[in-house]
Image: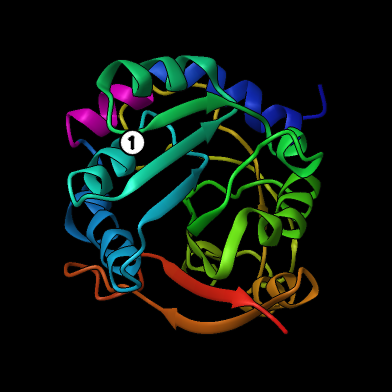
Amino acid sequence: MEPLSDAKIVDSWQKNALTWISAVREEQIESRNLVTNQAIIDAILSRSPNSVLDIGCGEGWLARELTAKGIHVMGVDVIPTLIEQAQAAGGGDFFVASYEEIAEGKLRASVDVAVCNFALFGKEPVEGLFRVVPSLLKPRGLFIVQTLHPVVACGDSPYQEGWRQGSWAGFSSNFTDPAPWYFRTLENWIELFVVSGFRLMEMHEPIHPKTQQPASVIFIAEVAG
């Protein structure tokens, strides 16, 4: 298996699914607890949706939070173990699906908001997903993405698009075989929205209260035209 590839991302998450579930449910990840969880919840609630599609939903924590607010949530993820745990915990309708399958039209949905919360780490499957998201939205529907802030996540590497080695730095030692990820600059992200048929409406940079650096970047986009 190519070490810097979308297939390797899925392979890594399959290996680390149970460890990830523990990390999320035991609130082991500081940035999530202090900043990014509430940031994505607030971004979604600011649009007052009745229905949300959580793409790359993991074990379903966001779906449970939104369902508690009276929102109907559908969640999809490529990792069966994560979906099994999401189904067991409730709070939405959950299905196993890869981004490639979604791009091929195998997911039927019509929602007010589609959200990807730290779930876009690959290349071609992510690009294919972006192209199909407009078809999953109701008229005036929105696509909300929270991801690593490129300026901070770049570190000392060149600020240019391309594959990067993965790392579990800052996570439990129980995690193994970190997934690679495809780095995009802010310009690359904005371009991806535009070429996929979106108009970027807002961009937010949630600040970590300890480091005073952006903990993430959140894009809110609508279908253009």
User: Would you identify the image quadrant in which residue 205 lies?
Assistant: bottom left
In the rendered image, residue 23 lying in the magenta stretch gets the answer yes
Q: Where is residue 7 in the image (x, y as percent from the top left)?
A: 75, 28
Looking at the rendered structure, the kind of residue marked 1 is Phe
Q: In this view, does 60 lie to the left or right of 10?
A: left
Q: In this view, does 94 lie to the left or right of 10?
A: left
**Would you identify the image quadrant in which residue 20 lies?**
top left
Above-or-below relation of 222 to 124: below
Numbered-mark total: 1
Asked which secondary structure carries label 1, the reply is: loop
Q: Which residue is drawn at 64% across and 39% down?
A: 108
169 lies above or below 42: above
The boundaries of the magenta stretch are 20-27
What residue is disc 1 on?
171
Can residue 174 be seen from the camera position used here?
Answer: no
Q: Which quarter of the rendered picture does the N terminus lie within?
A: top right
Q: Which residue is drawn at 52% across and 68% down?
A: 142
Q: Which of 174 and 65 is in front in this view?
A: 65
Tell me the quarter of the image containing the C terminus.
bottom right
Residue 138 falls within the magenta-colored stretch = no
| Residue 111 in view, yes or no | yes
Quadrant of residue 31 within the rendered picture: bottom left
Estimate how packed mark 1 is, as few (under 14), some (14 to 19) or many (20 or more) residues with alpha carbons within 10 Å. few
Q: In this view, does 61 lie above or below 202?
A: above
Across and down, in percent, residue 82 comes to 44, 22
- Rendered location of residue 8, percent (x, y): 70, 28
Query: Along the horizontal axis of the image, is 100 left or right of 185?
Result: right
Residue at x 57%, y 62% (from the top left corner): 138
User: Magenta part mainly helix, strand or loop?
Assistant: helix
How far from the left and from the top, in percent, is residue 74?
45, 39
Q: In the depicted view, which residue is nearer to us: 81 or 3?
A: 81
